[in-house]
Amino acid sequence: MSDRDRKSRFGGPKGGGRGKDRDRNPHGKPQGRFEGRPEARSQGGGRPPWRDRDAKGGGRGHGKGHIKGEGPVILYGWHSVTMALANPKRRIRKLFVTENAERRLADEKIDTRVPPELVHPGDIDRRLGPDAVHQGLLLEADPLPGLHIDELPQDGVVLVLDQITDPHNVGAILRSAAAFGAKAIVTTGRHSPEATGVLAKSASGALELVPIVEVPNLHRALSEMNDAGFLTVGLDSEGQGDLAAVPLRAPLALVLGAEGKGLRQLTRETCAVVARMDMPGEIKSLNVSNAAVLALYIGTSRLGLMG
């Protein structure tokens, strides 16, 4: 490949050229035709790409999938990118790689599906920011289509997130959901992070494995789930009983509230059961992603799904 071909595909000056994949550039600034961080840019008041209805957020008759005209999902890091490449439902737009990452992809015989564009590590640093651990891979792709609320599987466990906004937490919850075989995650259209960037990296590939149902109104969605036969269990430190002792059955929906705020009042009132998770130590509350792991373990164990 010529020096001209190796020139930055991001439009900014070359970064480093040390011959190895770096994950930070303390002095780099976003520049060129991809100014700013893609995840910050896409969250600036726009509607997120998780969609099971059209752009109007309408009723039951509307189609699934992402909104037309929205920008691409940005994925970076080895697991996030390679899992997306292996997902036939994920439409790939562009793949940017460093020399080391290109070599590793070839060594592991991973089908890139599109011709990769060779860049320097600093070019990816400048696009994502200095703290992104990208491992020499950046992918632009279309959002995955979501499920409709009435398409939820009628077996196993589903997680419901009540306005959890931290992308690190949601990504970690997705990863745990994939590990425990959760059937889907239900989340709100507003007050939830986009399925891109930091969230996808934190999910470590689980974004390709766990279907997302995005709803405009969580109260209405929970009511529909109750009517469809789901046992909806809200998790709250002041719940009526310990989750480990509450009679559980499938299909089971475990409902988690936002960090600090917990479940909103209407969410609590709509759940069939509100339970707590008793712990023997001095600290009685957990980070929401850790609480999700414990709840998934209790739920899947009680339903006989661990083996």
Image (cartoon, rainbow, N blue to C red):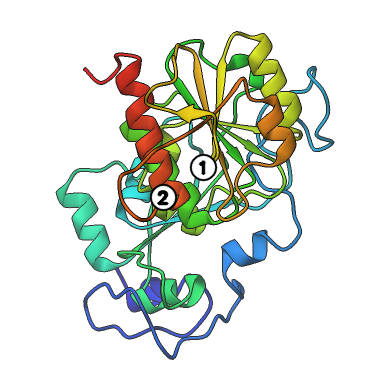
Q: Position of residue 164 (x, y in %)?
A: 59, 48
- Horizontally, residue 111 falls left or right of residue 92, namely left
- The image shows residue 256, relative to residue 219, as above or below, that is below
* Circles 2 and 1 in contact, beta carbons < 8 Å: yes
Helix, strand, or loop for circle 2? loop
Residue 37 x, y percent position in the rendering: 57, 70
Q: Quadrant of the C terminus?
A: top left
Q: Position of residue 146 (x, y in %)?
A: 60, 30
Residue drawn at the location 74% of the way across and 29% of the way down: 219
Q: Amino acid at mark 2?
A: Lys
User: Which mark, residue 122?
Assistant: none
The answer to whether 12 is drawn above or below residue 46 in the figure is: below
Picture residue at 48% right of the left edge, 59% below the top = 198
Inspect the image, locate mark 1, and give the three-letter code of the amino acid beneath it.
Ser
Q: CA distance from mark 2 to mark 1?
A: 8 Å
Instruction: Report whether residue 14 is seen.
Output: yes
Please tell me how many numbered marks the rendered image carries. 2
* Mark 1 residue element: loop
Q: Is residue 299 left or right of residue 149?
A: left
- Quarter holding the N terminus is bottom left
Q: Quick one: label 2 or label 1, which is nearer the N terminus?
A: 1
What is the number of the mark on residue 237? Answer: 1
Q: Foreground residue, 75 or 251?
A: 251
Residue nearer the viewer, 228 or 15: 228
Q: Residues within 10 Å of mark 2 (few under 14, many from 20)?
A: few
Q: Nearer the viewer, residue 131 or 261?
A: 261
Which residue is most to the left? 107
| 279 relative to 128 in the view: left or right | left
As drawn, the label of residue 284 is: 2
Nearer-the-camera pick, 61 or 213 = 213
